[in-house]
Image (cartoon, rainbow, N blue to C red):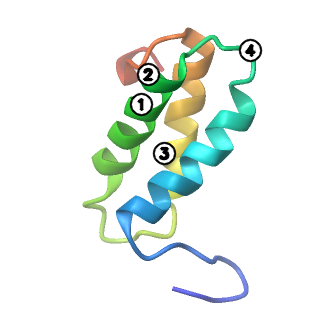
Amino acid sequence: MDNSFAQVPTGAEAIVALVRREAAEESVDGRLPPPALDRCVREAVFALWDSPIKTFVPLLALRRVRCCIRTGTCDFGEC
């Protein structure tokens, strides 16, 4: 989907890569180690992937991952 308001990658793996890049920039303090961050990103994207509207999947997944970075664990129940 390409329009002037949102350019969303079309596949789940592309969204995983996009969210991973953004999350890595925000997790420079090492609170969440890279393997845990990768797992967290994948879980966040695929938990949202079945949504009928894909436009907001990257944003919502990144929000979940930011919570994981703050808490230092990949547990979406805490946020």
Which is more N-terminal, label 3 or label 2?
Answer: 2
Q: Residues within 10 Å of mark 2 (few under 14, many from 20)?
A: some
Which is more N-terminal, label 3 or label 4?
Answer: 4
Tag shown at residue 40: 1
Q: Name the foreground residue: 28 vs 73.
A: 28
69 left or right of 15 in image: right
Q: Amino acid at mark 3?
A: Ala
Identify the residue under disc 2.
Answer: 36
Q: Are marks 2 and 3 in contact (CB under 8 Å)?
A: no
Q: Residues within 10 Å of mark 3 (few under 14, many from 20)?
A: many
15 left or right of 29 in image: left
Task: Determine which quarter of the picture holds residue 77.
Answer: top left
Q: CA distance from mark 4 to mark 1?
A: 16 Å
Q: Are marks 2 and 1 in contact (CB under 8 Å)?
A: yes
Q: Secondary structure at mark 3?
A: helix
Between marks 2 and 3 in the image, the one whose residue lies nearer the viewer: 2
Identify the residue under disc 4.
Answer: 29
Q: Position of residue 64 (x, y in %)?
A: 50, 34
